[in-house]
């Protein structure tokens, strides 16, 4: 079929302009497609992000549930093992107690036997107490010089006929085996006529402390508890009951050397009638 142009002649020159509008419309429609594709891509990305976040939340919740279950299991296991921990604590406490008892091992029997032989017969002991003198312990001695040295010691209190007898006692105590220091805190005559267990004119009353600084028990305690500056946590018992008062001294074991030493010290203390705190026997 042959195409026929029905437009008048004056309009036929403008007819070719109509096809130019078609590409413009095609460009507009192409941009809309891109916009739709971009929106779809954005929706897909947002959906993917939501899925990933949801999966992470679910994974974290699963991990939390697993950790909670493990914690509950650990708590149950610890509760089952608690009796063993209590037993360990009890055993450790008993070990510390045994260390304290080992540190308190001192040959009090031999020390008292030697002291009883060294005390002159005319001297009367009215009180006697002994303790380890370690940090954290409490002794039964009221002598102010007892706490000056942290070592086993025996505190003596009594009376003697004269100051010479007190000096003789100090010299004999210093000669006892194992004694490192003998401190006389007082030796004074009472005012007026005071009833006393000793004979003589106003017999002096004395108080002395006998120290055993080279005791093996002290070394054992130092090895068991090196840090004694703050005081040990181990209870160390006292060894000599301070209630054993009213003991008379025995004059056994009097030697010539001890008598000479006593006489030498008696010459300087015969006329002393006042207290002499802190005095140490040579």
Image (tube, helix red, strand yellow):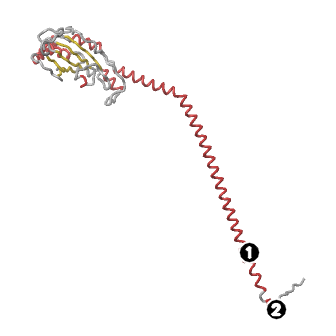
Q: Residue at x 26, y 22 (%)?
A: 213
The mark total stands at: 2
Q: Which residue is mark 1?
A: 26
- Identify which residue is drawn at 59% across, 42% down: 64
**Residue tagged by mark 2?**
9
The span from disc 2 to disc 1 (Cα, nearest Å) is 31 Å
Residue 10 location (% of width, % of height): 79, 91
Image quadrant in which the N terminus is located:
bottom right
x then y, percent, for residue 49? 64, 55
> For this rendering, which residue is in front, 263 or 54?
54
Res. 70 image quadrant: top right
The image quadrant that residue 26 belongs to is bottom right
- The answer to whether residue 51 is above or below residue 42 is above
Say which of marks 2 and 1 sits in front: 2
Residues 123 and 127: in front is 127
Mark 1: secondary structure: helix
Q: Position of residue 66 (x, y in %)?
A: 60, 40
**Is residue 28 left or right of 167 when viewed as pictured?**
right
Q: Secondary structure at mark 2?
A: helix
Q: Nearer the viewer, residue 104 or 58?
A: 58
Q: Quadrant of residue 145?
A: top left
The dot on residue 124 is none
145 w.r.t. 72: above or below = above
Residue 168 vertical position relative to residue 2 in the rendered view, above or below: above
Label 2 vs 1, first from the N-terminus: 2
Q: Nearer the viewer, residue 23 or 260?
A: 23
């Amino acid at each position: 079929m042959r195409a026929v142009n029905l437009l008048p002649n004056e309009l036929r020159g403008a007819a070719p302009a109509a096809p130019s509008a078609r590409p413009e419309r095609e460009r507009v429609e192409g941009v809309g497609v891109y916009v739709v594709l971009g929106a779809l891509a954005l929706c897909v990305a947002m959906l993917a992000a939501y899925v990933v976040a949801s999966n992470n939340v679910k994974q974290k919740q699963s991990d939390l549930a697993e950790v909670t279950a493990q914690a509950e299991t650990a708590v149950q296991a610890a509760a089952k093992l608690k009796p063993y921990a209590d037993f360990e604590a009890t055993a450790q406490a008993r070990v510390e107690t045994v260390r304290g008892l080992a540190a308190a091992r001192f040959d009090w029997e031999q020390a008292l036997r030697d002291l009883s032989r060294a005390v002159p017969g005319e001297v009367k002991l009215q009180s006697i107490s002994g303790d380890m003198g370690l940090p954290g312990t409490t002794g039964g001695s009221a002598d102010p010089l007892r706490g000056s040295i942290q070592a086993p010691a025996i505190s003596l209190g009594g009376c003697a006929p004269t100051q010479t007898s007190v000096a003789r006692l100090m010299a004999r105590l210093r000669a006892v085996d194992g004694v490192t220091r003998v401190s006389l805190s007082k030796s004074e005559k009472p005012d007026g006529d005071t009833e006393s267990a000793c004979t003589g004119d106003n017999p002096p009353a004395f108080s002395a402390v006998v120290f055993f600084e080279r005791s093996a028990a002290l070394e054992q305690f130092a090895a068991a508890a090196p840090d004694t500056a703050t005081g040990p946590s181990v209870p160390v018992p006292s060894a000599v009951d301070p209630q054993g008062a009213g003991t008379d001294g025995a004059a056994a074991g009097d030697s010539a050397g001890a008598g000479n030493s006593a006489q030498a010290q008696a010459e300087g203390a015969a006329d002393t009638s006042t207290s002499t705190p802190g005095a140490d026997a040579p």
